[in-house]
Image (tube, rainbow, N blue to C red):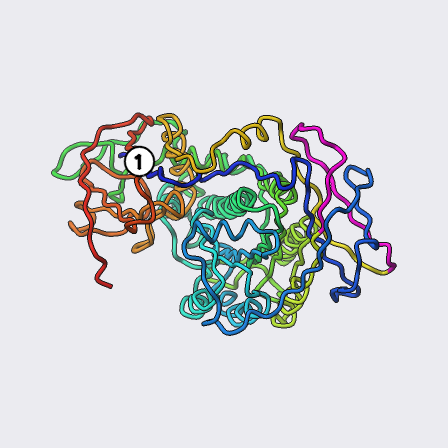
Amino acid sequence: MFAAALLAAAQQPAPEQPPRFRGGTNFVQVDVFATRGGEPVQDLTAAEFELYEDNDAQKIDTFEHIVVAPAGPQPERVEPSSPTRANQLAADPHRRVFVVFLDFFHVSVEGSHRIKEPLIEMLSRIVGPDDLVGVMTPDMSPSQITFGRKTQVIEQGLRDHWYWGRRFSIRLDEYEQKYDTCYPPRPGDGAQSGLAGALIGRRRERAVLEALHDTVLHMASIREGRTAVITITDGWLLYRPDERLTTLRTDPFTGAREPVPGSPPPVGVGPGGTLTSKLNSQGFLDERSECDRDRMNLAMMDNWQYFRDLYQDANRANVSFDPIDPRGLSAFDSQIGPDAPVDLVTDHAMLRTRNDTLRTLAENTDGLALVDNNDLRKQLRRVADDLTSYYLIGYYSTNATLDGRFRSIKVRSRRPGIDIRARKGYRAPTAAEVNGVAASPAAAPAIPGDQVAITAALNVLERDARIDESRAGARARIASLESPALFRRGPLTGNVVQPAPNRRFSRTDRMHAEAVAGEVASWTAALLDRTGKRLPVPVTAGTGTNAS
């Protein structure tokens, strides 16, 4: 099996842009939200603010009060001409940027249907004429987020695909089916073994947290201003290491134990009557070694620590989270049936943990957590009102040291009774970063070398391995917004060109890439084997017209 990754190499910046420094290397901008009793305060002046960096008072050099007006009719909103242009517009701190994160792993189909209209109403209220909004899901790369001003496409998608929630669903992706095959249920387990269910839950939670973390890093590379991530989710349990998941299981009736990890697979009869160890009793490739590797990794991972790193990095990147529980006021965390639910004490603890994680995420990123409330419209209007008025404050830090360290920021109001929310701090640039920005040509083409291309390709494959790789008809995942769409043709597709759900191809596949002519002058690509070594491959190029 091979790995193919396409990398843009035309008149455009590399996907990870260097940090931007406005007005000098020590100029810092802070978005400040001032409220009294939950209502925005709109008459504060610069003299009524106190600003501290690492407990040292700072002089306010720029001060703006920004009030966002309704965007008006959808036809009057002008969309960015391209994804690249949208990212350029997002860099302006005067524009608000929203990311709607749909955590389908931790939202039931009832929840996705329930949140549909309140979420659409909130987007209509908060998105102003110059604001940008995009959608992110756990199976996307953040570079696939397409920012726009019109919300019609998002609204239509939420209405047409209201069933996007997958929590409690019987649908399993390729990896989850593999766990079911490797660890079948024992007597008394129900439809799914407890071990397979635990591994699936841990894998899904880590995939969501990694997607959120990737979103934070992506937005930090695009803009310095605040990014609001509206996260629709039931919350997470934040799994800790559990060595019990590595204990070999024993059949309660026969006393037979699981094979020790690393044992040779049994020999069976394969296609054509030949003896082989490549097939298991169900006729699938024997992937027990992969299952055991995942079992060890998932059992020992620490999502609680990863969660802490997530909101700390969000503070540094000026990204706030507004988590919304679409269940509203819920009495139970587990579903009723088909398998026996957990006991009431455990269920209550799970429900409390999920709600606490959402509150913690919001409190530590200056967002609002909407949990335990059945009036979703009222709750979402609260978020909308909170985000329509803010102050943009800029200052030149008295600490001009280019050390790359984190510096805390505190903003206070001299007027009594005012609640202030602002970014917790930022990471100072290093001398190498500043010198690199100054020395880099403004429009130099970014053509990756061999090592850069291979590293980028392997990073893309690592991302693909964490997400659903087998959804039929899924849009081809791409390395960046400017990359072509990937398709494949081969024996498994019935010799028909179909969207490639990932970037892994076999020797019998033919890869087909499509890109809009004129957007990018040229492309480079790398075809890698299992070890990351480049392979020669013939390429045929052509142009055509989309009949649609």
Residue in the image at 37% along x and 46% along y: 482
Above or below — where is 528 with respect to 52?
Answer: above
The quadrant holding residue 479 is top left
Measured from the top left, where is residue 326 in percent x and y? 57, 64
User: Which quadrant is the N terminus positioned in?
Assistant: top left
- Pick out the residue farthest to the left: 272
Measured from the top left, where is residue 193 in percent x and y? 44, 48
- Tell me if 111 is positioned left or right of 493 in this view: right
Instruction: Compare residues 246 and 85 and report the one nearer the observer.
Output: 85
Residue 205 visible, this orientation: no
Measured from the top left, where is residue 407 in percent x and y? 72, 36
The quadrant holding residue 127 is bottom right
Residue in the image at 37% along x and 41% along y: 182
Dot 1, crowdedness within 10 Å: few (<14), some or many (≥20)? some
Residue at image mark 1? 524
- Tell me if 191 is positioned left or right of 90 in this view: left
- Tell me if 231 is positioned left or right of 428 in this view: left
Measured from the top left, where is residue 336 in percent x and y? 52, 64
Q: Is residue 400 magenta?
A: yes
Q: Does the magenta stretch include residue 450?
A: no
SS assignment at label 1: strand
Residue 452 visible, this orientation: yes
Which residues, given as a range, are shown in magenta?
Answer: 393-416
